[in-house]
Amino acid sequence: MKRNLLRLLTPALVLMILSAVMEGICALLLAFLVSRLQTPEHELLMLIIATMIALLVQYMAVTRGFSAGGAVVNMLVKALIVHLPRAVSPHKQADGLLSGPIGQVMSAPAHLLAPLVSACITPLTIIAGVGIWYPGLALLLLCVVILIALLLRISAKHLHKQELRLAAAASDIYITMAHFARHQALLRSSDNQSGASSALMQQLDEHHRSHQLLLRRSLPWHLAFVIALQLLLFLTILFGANAVMTQQLDIPHWMALIILLLRLFEPLLQLSHLDQALRQLRHAFRQVEQVLSAEEIPFVALDGPTPQDNSIRIHGVTLYAQNSDRGLEGLDAFCAAGQMLVIVGPSGAGKSSLIQLISRMQDPLVGRIEYGGCDIRSLSIQQLAKTQGVLFQANRLLRGSVSWNLTQGREDIDHEQLGSLLTALGLSPDILEEEVGTGGDRFSGGQKQRLCLARLLLHTPSLLLLDEPTASLDRHNANRVIELIRNYPGTRIIITHDPAMACVADSVWVLEDGKLTETGSPVELRQRGGWFYRFCKDKDTSL
C-alpha cells in the first residue's frame, strides 16, 4: 500500500519541491534587489520572471495535490471494499474510517504536504543561495534552523502526550453520549432518564474541566517554539541595527538580511501547527493500515466446481471463539436442498458462529462444510455471492430512498413488484420514495429489519441464511415474515428464539454449549421431551 501511495503522490511531490525552491529563489532575488537599490533594472526583471514561474509551478502543485488526494481516497476505498468482506473479523475501527481517517488522508496532499515541503525546502534553498556569497552567514543560518528544529522536537514530544490524553477523554465522552442517545426508549420506559441525564452532564463537566487543564499544560510547549522564533528574529534585527549604527553594515544590506530572515522563519513558523497535523495524519494512516492488514479468508481466484444443489453438509466442524476455549466442537449435520432449517438453543451456544461458517465469514479450525457436495473453500467469492443471501441482526440501510435501497440500482425490478413485497411484509408501498436517513434511522427497528429482508429476497438467492429475522417484530408482523420465509423457494437456514417459527420448519437443530444435542422435525423433537420440548412448552406456536 505504501508503494502505491508513493506512486500516486510522486508527481505532486515533485511539483511541490519545485514550488518551494522557486519561493526560496524569489526571496534571494528580492534580497539581492533591495541590497542594490541604486541599479535595480536587471534584478527587478529577474524577480518578476522568477515570481511568474513560481506562481505557475505553485498552481500546478496545488491542483496536482487535490488530484492526488482524490486518487489516494479512491485507492483506499477500493482496497476496503475488496478487503472488508474477506476479513476474518472486521476491525472495530472500520466503521468510521470514511468519515474520519480516510477524510484526513484525502486532504493531506493539498493542505498538509505542500506547506510541509515549503517549510523544509524553502529555508534550505535560501541558506544554499546565501552560501554562494556569504558562507559564514549561511553556516550561522543553518545552525539557527537546526536549533529551531530541536526546539520543535522537544515541544512536540510534550504536546503529543497531552494530545493522547485529550483524545482518550474525548473518546470516553463520545461513547457515553452514544449510549445515552441509543437507549433513550429504555431510559424513558424505566423512568430513569433524569438520572441518566444527570450522570451524563456530570461526566461532561468533568471532561470539560480535564480538557481545560490539559490545554493549560500544553499551551507553554506550544508557545515555546513560537517565542523562540520571535526572539531569534528580534535579536537579529537588534544586532543588525547596531551594525548599521556603527557603520559595519549599510542599510540596504541590513534590509536584505531582514527579508531573508523573514522568508526563512515564515515557513518554519508553520511547523508548530504542521507537526500536530502530521501526528494526526500518521495516526489516521495507522488506523487504515490496521484495518487493511487484518487477516483475510483465503478465497480461490477462479470459480470452483459447480454445486449440485443447495444442500449443506457439515463434517466434524470445530471452531473456538477468539481468546476462549468455548465454541463449536465436532459438529456433523445435514440440511437437504429446499428445506427450511431452524437453529435454536440458549444464548452463547454458537448459533451465530455456525451461520458465519456456513456463509464462509470464518473457516473452521477442524472439519469442512460442503455446499451442494462441494467443499465451500473450493468456491470463489463470486460463486458464493450469487447463491447466498445473508441477513444478520445488525441491519443497516444505506443513505437514499427506500426504493434505491431495495433495488440497489437494478432496473429489472419494477414498483409493482416492490409494492407487493412490502405489502406482504406489512409495510406500505407509499414509503418507497421516502429517504431512509443515516443508517435508516428514520424508520423503527422492526421496519428496518423488514426492509433489509425485502432487499435480500429481491435478489432471489438460492440459500437464505437469517439470524433472528423476527427479533424486532410484534406477533402480527412476525407471522407475516414467517409465512414469507416458509413459502420461499430455496434452502433456508434460520437462527431464532421464536417457537412459532421453529415449529413450522422442516427440520430443527438444537445447539447447546457448541454441540448439536438434538436434530429432527419439530414434531419429533417435541415428543422427545428435551430442550426443544421445553423451548416450545406453554408457548403460542400458532400462526
Image (tube, rainbow, N blue to C red):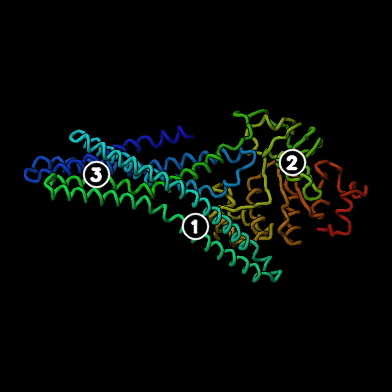
Q: Is residue 305 visible?
A: yes
Residue 55: give its label. Answer: 3
Please tell me whether residue 180 is drawn above or below residue 492 in the rendered image.
below
Q: Is residue 216 above or below residue 72?
A: below
Q: Amino acid at mark 3?
A: Leu
Residue 229 placement (x, y as % from top left): 31, 49
Label 1: which secondary element: helix
Q: Is residue 520 above or below residue 421?
A: above
The mark that comes first in sequence, 3 or 2, is: 3
Is label 3 in a helix, a strand or a loop? Answer: helix
Q: Residues within 10 Å of mark 1 (few under 14, many from 20)?
A: some
Judged left or right of residue 46, residue 176 is: right
The amino acid on which the numbered mark 2 sits, given as a three-letter code, is Ser
Q: Residue at x 51, y 48 (%)?
A: 98
**Which is more foreground, mark 3 or mark 1?**
1
Residue occupied by mark 2? 324
Question: Could you say whether the residue bearing mark 2 is in a helix, strand or loop?
Answer: loop
Give the residue type at disc 1: Leu
The image's mark for residue 504 is none
Query: Which residue is found at the position 62% from the left and 68% from the top?
Result: 197
- Label 1 sits on residue: 214
How far apart, in angstroms, are the residues tagged by discs 3 and 1?
41 Å
Between disc 1 and disc 2, whose residue precedes?
1
Q: With 389 as the anchor, is 530 left or right in this view?
A: right
Instruction: Work out whether mark 3 precedes mark 1 in sequence or the reverse, and give the earlier one.
Output: 3
User: Residue 40, how many percent across, how many down?
Assistant: 9, 43
Compare residues 310 and 123 and report the one nearer the observer: 123
Badge 3 vs badge 2, beta-carbon distance below 8 Å: no
How far across and down, in percent of the image, does residue 530 sit?
Answer: 90, 48
**Outermost residue to the left:** 38
Q: CA distance from mark 3 to mark 2?
A: 62 Å
Residue 99 seen by the camera = no
